[in-house]
Amino acid sequence: MTIKDIPAAFVFDKTLKLGMSDTDVRYLQVVLNSDSDTKLTGEGMGSAGQETNYFGGKTKQAVIKFQEKYMDEILGPVGLSKGTGIVGPTTRAMLNFLLGK
């Protein structure tokens, strides 16, 4: 999957969570917004083309949707049945897989 606005060499390699501000968060939002099931919002800050570096409530909710969409790959291996909103190792692995890494 090639997603516009994410450098080809980029890899998700750190834990991301509520309250953080980082370029990785913007790339996370770009990936989440590329799928209608996990997009942050339809308009305004955080929407496609208006991603930010801030991991706020909308990002957390979109991460939970992402985690639950890919439950078998993300939550199952760590014994969870509901998303946490924290971008840990299994969530990063799925994000990187979608980026072809």
Image (cartoon, rainbow, N blue to C red):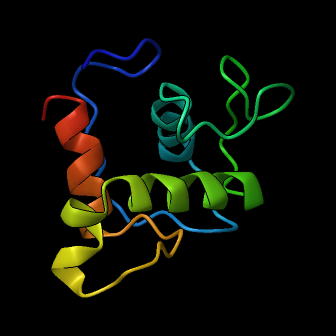
Q: Residue furthest bottom?
A: 79
Horizontal side of 74 relative to 50 (left or right) equals: left
Q: Residue furthest right?
A: 44
Question: In this view of the protein, can residue 88 be seen by the observer?
Answer: yes
Please identify the quadrant where the C terminus is shown. Answer: top left
Percent coordinates x, y for residue 43 in the rendering: 83, 25
* Residue 78 placement: quadrant: bottom left
Tell me: residue 93, above or below residue 80: above
Percent coordinates x, y for residue 32 in the rendering: 51, 38
Percent coordinates x, y for residue 2 in the rendering: 28, 15
Percent coordinates x, y for residue 46 in the rendering: 74, 35
* Residue 4 placement: quadrant: top left
Horizontal side of 76 relative to 24 (left or right) equals: left
Question: In this view of the protein, can residue 21 be seen by the observer?
Answer: no
Image point (70%, 67%), residue name = 19
Horizontal side of 44 relative to 22 (left or right) equals: right
Image point (25%, 88%), residue name = 79
Horizontal side of 68 relative to 8 (left or right) equals: right
Image point (40%, 60%), residue name = 67
- Count all numbered tags in the image, as a single digit: 0
Q: Residue furthest left?
A: 101
Image point (35%, 61%), residue name = 14
- Foreground residue, 27 or 75? 75
- Foreground residue, 70 or 58? 70
Please identify the quadrant where the N terminus is shown. Answer: top left
